[in-house]
Amino acid sequence: MDMNYLYWRRGVSLTRARAATCQASAQAHLDLFEAYGQRIVARRRAANA
């Protein structure tokens, strides 16, 4: 999975969280947003190691 895809999915997750009509849906998308962020950080650390 390349970095551009991770950044794109992270942005989509945030957009969907903001547009969610219920709290459960918003939280699910925020959880995905956070998970993609963690994957990005892990990939950046691995690239710099």
Image (cartoon, rainbow, N blue to C red):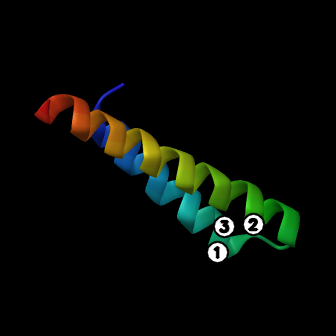
Q: Looking at the picture, tell me which residue is in the foreground, 16 or 40.
A: 40
Quadrant placement of the C terminus: top left
Q: Kindly report the distance in space between the C-alpha atoms of the residues bearing marks 3 and 1.
A: 4 Å
Q: In the figure, 24 relative to 48: above or below?
A: below
Where residue 18 is drawn, which disc sits there?
1
Q: Which residue is found at the position 55% from the left and 46% from the top?
A: 35
Task: Residue type at mark 1: give it.
Answer: Arg
Q: Which residue is found at the position 44% from the left and 51% from the top?
A: 37
Q: Is residue 18 left or right of residue 14?
A: right
Which residue of the protein is positioned furthest toward the front in this rendering? 49
Q: Is residue 49 left or right of residue 40?
A: left
Task: Residue type at mark 2: give it.
Answer: Ala
Q: Secondary structure at mark 2?
A: helix
Task: Residue type at mark 3: give it.
Answer: Ala
Which residue of the protein is positioned furthest toward the top in this rendering? 1
Q: Secondary structure at mark 3?
A: helix
- Per the image, the residue denoted by label 3 is 17
Q: In the figure, 38 relative to 16: above or below?
A: above
Q: Are marks 2 and 1 in contact (CB under 8 Å)?
A: yes
Where residue 26 is drawn, which disc sits there?
2
Where residue 32 is drawn, which disc sits there?
none
Q: In the figure, 3 relative to 12: above or below?
A: above
Q: In the figure, 49 relative to 7: above or below?
A: above
